[in-house]
Image (spheres, rainbow, N blue to C red):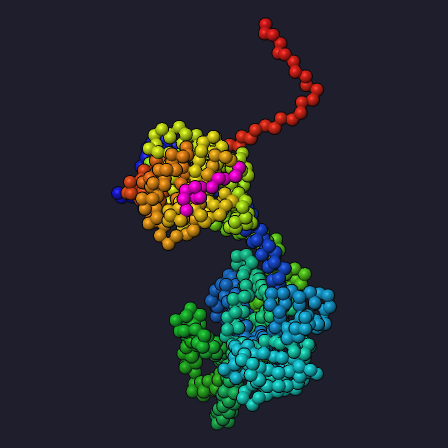
Amino acid sequence: MATHVISRADAPYAVPPAANAREDDIDIPTIVSTLTDNKWPILLGTLAFFLVAVAYVLLATPQYEANAVVQVESRPPTVPGLNQPNTAPTPPIVDSPAATETQLLTSRRVLGEAIERLDLDTVIEPVRMPVLGDTLARMQQRLHPGEVGEPWFGLNSYAWGGEQVDIGQFIVPEQLVGIPLQLIAGERGQYKLLDPDGNLLLEGRVGQKASNGRGLSLQIDRLAANAGTRFEMTRLNTMALMTQLKKDITVSEQGRNSGIINLTYPHPDALRAKQVLDQITQAYVRQNVARNSAEAAKRLQFVTEQLPKVRRELADAQQRLNTFQSRTRTMDVGVSNKALLDQTVALDQSIQQLQVQRADIASRYTPEHPVYQSLMRQIGQFESKKNQIMSQIGNLPDTQQGLFRLNRDVEVINQTYANLLDQAQQLNIAAASAVGNARVIDPADVNMDSPSWPKPLIVIGAGTLIGAMFMIAFVLTRQMFRRGVEDPVDIELLGLPVYASIPFSPKGKQIATQPGTHRRDGKQRLLAFRSPSDLAMEALRTLRTSLHFSRFEMKNNMLMIAAPSPGVGKTFVCANLAVTIAQAGQRVLLIDADMRRGTAHLALGTRADGGLSELLSGHIDDVQAVRKVGGTDNLSFISRGAVPPNPSELLMHPRFGALLDKLSQQYDIVVIDTPPILAVTDAAVIGHHVGTCLMVVRWGLNQQREIALAKQRLEQNGVEVRGAIFNAVQKKGSGQYAYTYYDYQPMKDGPIKDAPFRDPAPAR
């Protein structure tokens, strides 16, 4: 017989089609009911997250954020000697250079200068007590600023606040870079430096340089700490430090194309955060000025190199003119040729200046650049005009031509030399007084009274919200993966009618788990005696009624209570059902047939030995095995007896069937508590002798497939399961109310005062 689990969709009679919800629809009432039922775990979990967030706020090391603002102007600076109105055109300027400058602010060149000036690559941290050390140190500084805290509990190896170490020099070999070394403060300014394994590297005294001769040297200028206090001292890798700084520093432009750049840097030490950001902004401005004055310095170098050459050319030209005049006895050019000489000198001077500019521009641009091409066109125009004048001069006598050329050379070279001297002076001034296009608007500063992190309201609020969301998700996920049956319809779809649905009884759980439950103290632990008006007992009375009216269909008066697995409350149902039947005036015999782990004797407050195992073994007779149960005259009980080595064989012996036939004639009903069906075969053996078999299924524990397998196993052995008892039902989710019971307690009548009985008025 194959096991087939039937879903609700396979049984159209189970749920009306109009009410059958799609599997992928969200059942809001069920979710709300599930969250309501698990409100205490959700609240406790949320409270735990809240307490963790509060502890984090109290114990976390505060971070202080330094802030600075830099302005970058889009126009280039005006440099004397560089921005002449007659120079060649310059390429267009980008509207906002902030995108480029934000990268320069965190470049290695800028960060490297800040690291070098502040010795950021040397890190020394005091070793504090775990968890509470930082909090106690901050408290010490608030109460006694500038003082070294006294050790608590004699733990002088930890730092308790106020410790200060000033490093004058710290040089380590390459293999110790990035390795944390241990610095131990000693008496009277002495100290020791150890490696991570505790080996001594060097010893020294404050104010003196110490070295071990293997590339390690250390000079401490100041050491304020208790003797024995430990510090972690590390020489960081510069590249790793730059990478970390670049990650920590936030650079952003305020507004689009505004040129206003904001810098922020968080650090636990507020003063250190301010110093780092201040050094970065200053180094950036200095490098910006140097970058903008580099053009003036480069031109000054070019002009300085040209001056000696032009001076020699001027001297040679003057010497040639004097020699020509002495030889030809000609003192000066004619008045008519003076105008041609002046024009030629002016053109040569302009050409000479453009040649100087071309040499400078050629070092910055290619010949195809528009600036270079424009300059060459100007030189060509001046050369053309000069050639026209030279053609006119070619018609003069030879003496006048020679004198004309020599005078022109002297005048041109003289003017060029004067211009170079003037440019050299201007460029010297420009290099000395150059300004950049970046300036610091707001110097680095930090709010000492308001840490940037942690923010109490944000951390506590977010922690509480995350806790609530996590607990809700946990509850819903657990409910989603919970495969136990929670609706009687799922049981009835397997062909098992639900005879009764017993609600979960907190009182019954309290009775079952009270101290002494697993000891033979003689106390009865039955809900039927302790709380007869409990809702679970009302459900058992309903089951008693159902069994009473169906007894005519039974082949005998023996009732077997089975279960798929342990822990479903089978013994609870058997014992309390037997009591309720006995209280109705019927003679009832309860047999604990679970000779392996039966516990019915604990619920009835009696001993286990002298029961069924001894009776089937022939050690005692039925008179000795049957015991009366106190609290009711109609209930008798046979315990499981001592645990035998062969329970199944004892149950299969003919003596067991003969015993049941004999006992069934002496009582109105015999209730048999059996072992779990899926665990052992005892229930299948017992089922052949009984007239009725009911299966106990626990809410949320037994899966539908598990129930079907237990039913199949009994039916394969010829045992018919007439129905199921749905035990420990809880009101969770929609659809769980069909087989539960309402609390309907009897009213307690109080004394009637001042209310005399009166006959009803006659009807008219």
Find the residue positioned furthest to the top: 764
Q: Total number of numbered labels?
A: 0
Drawn side of residue 98 relative to residue 589, left or right:
right
- Residue at image point 52% right, 84% down: 173
Q: Nearer the viewer, residue 334 or 288?
A: 288
Residue 733 visible within the image: no
Residue 178 at x, y percent in the picture: 52, 77
Residue 637 at x, y percent in the picture: 45, 41
Residue 627 colored in magenta in the image: yes
Q: Nearer the viewer, residue 634 or 577?
A: 634
- Residue at image point 64% right, 73% down: 158
- Residue at image point 35% right, 48% down: 650
Q: Nearer the viewer, residue 630 or 31?
A: 630
Span shown in magenta: 620-631
- Residue at image point 50% right, 70% down: 243
Drawn side of residue 501 relative to residue 763, left or right:
left
Residue 647 visible within the image: yes
The quarter of the picture where the C terminus appears is: top right
Find the residue positioned furthest to the right: 144
Residue 539 at x, y percent in the picture: 47, 34
Find the residue positioned furthest to the left: 1
Q: Nearer the viewer, residue 155 or 597?
A: 597
Residue 242 colored in magenta in the image: no
Decide: is 109 above or below 93: below
Residue 437 at x, y percent in the picture: 57, 67
The quarter of the picture where the N terminus appears is: top left
Drawn side of residue 716 relative to residue 119, left or right:
left
Drawn side of residue 345 relative to residue 117, left or right:
left
